[in-house]
Amino acid sequence: MPEGPSVRKFHHLVSPFVGQQVVKTGGSSKKLNPASFQSLWLLDNQVHGKKLFLRFDPDEELGSLGNNSLPEPLQEGEKREEAEDQKQALGPSSREISSRSSQSLERVVPSGGNGLECLQGDTPAEGAERWLQVSFGLFGSIWMNEFSRAKKANKRGDWRDPIPRLVLYFGGGGFLAFYNCQMAWSPSPVVIPASDILSEKFHRARALEALSQEQPVCYTLLDQRYFSGLGNIIKNEALFRAGIHPLSLGSLLSPLHLEALVDHVVEFSADWLRGKFQGKQQHTQVYQKEQCPVGHQVMKEAFGPPGGFQRLTWWCPQCQPRLPPDEQEQGRLS
């Protein structure tokens, strides 16, 4: 699944097309009619965590009006949409933390809307802002001025190139191809810089408060309310670099351990993003490895809360020991 650094790279690929008109369309999408983008202008491009938001409008001049709406509380329809990202991290005190910190969230929502008008259907509702929400699922990607090619034969032995769900050709001569993306019209972008691990406004204090819950830290790290853009790769690598066992209860870890964990989340994510812009492949130390850099055997197991998603987790039992509760408590008090 593309994580924050990958989606930021997609955002970078789309940015040169802002201010251009769609002159031709294509793609296999049945949920969104590719032809409905014909003659629309791409006026804005925003990124948050694992999602991309593209604003389209039939009138180029409307782009100069900007978005003057005021922040409003999270809408019910959008809560359901984000619930999938939060199932991994359901803990006994997560609702309490969310309630205490909701006032500090920065969010762009149009005034007067209920958040439900345009989440489904081929085209946005009449008079609504045309924001296309792009989620990337497990294998989604965006290609600029080239199409994805088959890297290996399929199960039937055919070398068939992937088929894009949407292709947008712009007046400037280039095009964007969207592969395996889930796309839906929305009245506004969901932008919460305080929870985005790659944002300068990332709220460390709220992230640390969330991690201190009485639940395994590997659950909390995947909670997009506090660590938007963080996925399984970042989770595994940050825990290994911090020397913390995935099932360690956050409430029993010392503040120094939690601070170190957040530091590694931010540093690894930023390094990964820099590498993407430099054309370098990200090298992991424990994710999908058989041995850690020291040479210890790496363990692999699916962890997740009861009734929630079970995500594969890699860790080194020697570099990331699971301390008995009494020793964790001593560390917390020290």
Image: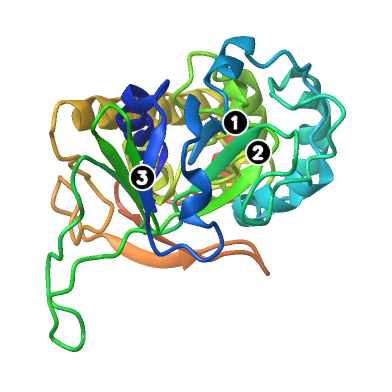
Instruction: Return the residue at label 2.
Output: 251
Asked if disc 1 and disc 3 are in contact, CB closer than 8 Å, the reply is no
* Residue 278: quarter of image: top left
At which x and y percent is residue 197?
48, 28
Q: Nearer the viewer, mark 2 or mark 3?
A: 3
Which of 110/76 is in front?
Answer: 110
For the N terminus, which image quadrant? bottom left
Left or right, 243 with reference to 195: left
Q: Nearer the viewer, residue 117 or 226?
A: 117
| Classed neighbour count for the residue bearing mark 2: other residues with Cα under 10 Å, few (<14), some (14–19), many (≥20) | many
Q: Of label 2 and label 1, which has the lower sequence position?
A: 2
Question: Type of residue at label 1?
Answer: Arg
Badge 2 or badge 3: first in the primary sequence: 3
Please tell me which residue lies in front, 8 or 38.
Answer: 38
Three-letter code for the amino acid on which mark 3 is drawn:
Lys
Residue drawn at (29%, 64%), measured in percent from left and top? Answer: 163
Question: For the residue labelled by badge 2, is the local secondary structure a helix, a strand or a loop?
Answer: helix
Image point 35% across, 31% down: which residue?
A: 14
Q: Nearer the viewer, mark 1 or mark 3?
A: 3
Q: Report x, y in % for residue 59.
A: 57, 24
Residue 78 spot, x, y in % from top left: 73, 45
Q: For the residue marked with disc 2, what is the amino acid?
A: Ser
Q: CA distance from mark 2 to mark 3?
A: 55 Å
